[in-house]
Image (spheres, rainbow, N blue to C red):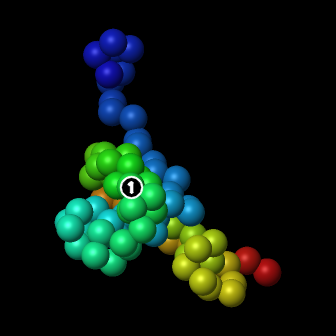
Amino acid sequence: MREHNLQQRPWLHLDSLTGWLYSSLLNVSEERRRSVIPDARSSDRLTAVRQRLQGLHGCDSPGVDFHKNGLRPYASSVFITRDRHFMELPGDGHYP
């Protein structure tokens, strides 16, 4: 922000439409994960993904599509934000 002389902090949106499922790994210990996923190669890959997800707490909003890897047969998405002003904006969830 200082480098570009910004007056406001940019909004950081996490487009986690397919990667959201991995966020469930953030609070799972390495030992527990390896007991559930004994295959070393798969477990190592999940460890790498977990490290990439450590910055999630710094995002202002994530987007999630449950129908992509949440095994939903129909379109279902959610937008989550910390800023309550979005609750006052008009929205329409009906898509004919």
Q: Quadrant of the N terminus?
A: top left
Query: Quick one: label 1, few (<14), some, or many (20+) residues within 10 Å?
Result: some
Residue at the location (60% across, 83% down)? 71
Residue 59 in sight in this render: no
Residue occupying the point 20% across, 67% down = 31
| 69 up-or-down from 46: above or below | below
40 is higher (above) or lower (below) than 48: below
Residue 41 placement, left or right of 59? right
x, y percent for residue 73? 68, 87
Residue that appears at 33% across and 12% down: 3
Residue where numbered disc 1 is placed: 44
Q: In which quadrant will I find the C terminus?
A: bottom right
Residue 33 placement (x, y as % from top left): 29, 70
Is 11 on the left or on the right of 18, as rendered? left
Asked which secondary structure carries label 1, the reply is helix
Q: Nearer the viewer, residue 4 or 71?
A: 71
Q: Residue furthest bottom?
A: 73
Q: Residue 85 at what x, y percent from top left?
A: 36, 59
Relative to 6, residue 74 above or below: below
* Residue 77 higher or lower than 13, as above or below: below
Q: Nearer the viewer, residue 34 or 90?
A: 34
Q: Identity of the amino acid at label 1?
A: Asp
Snapshot quadrant of residue 74: bottom right
When asked about the image quadrant of residue 11, the answer is top left
Identify the residue at horizontal 52%, vertical 53% (top origin). 15
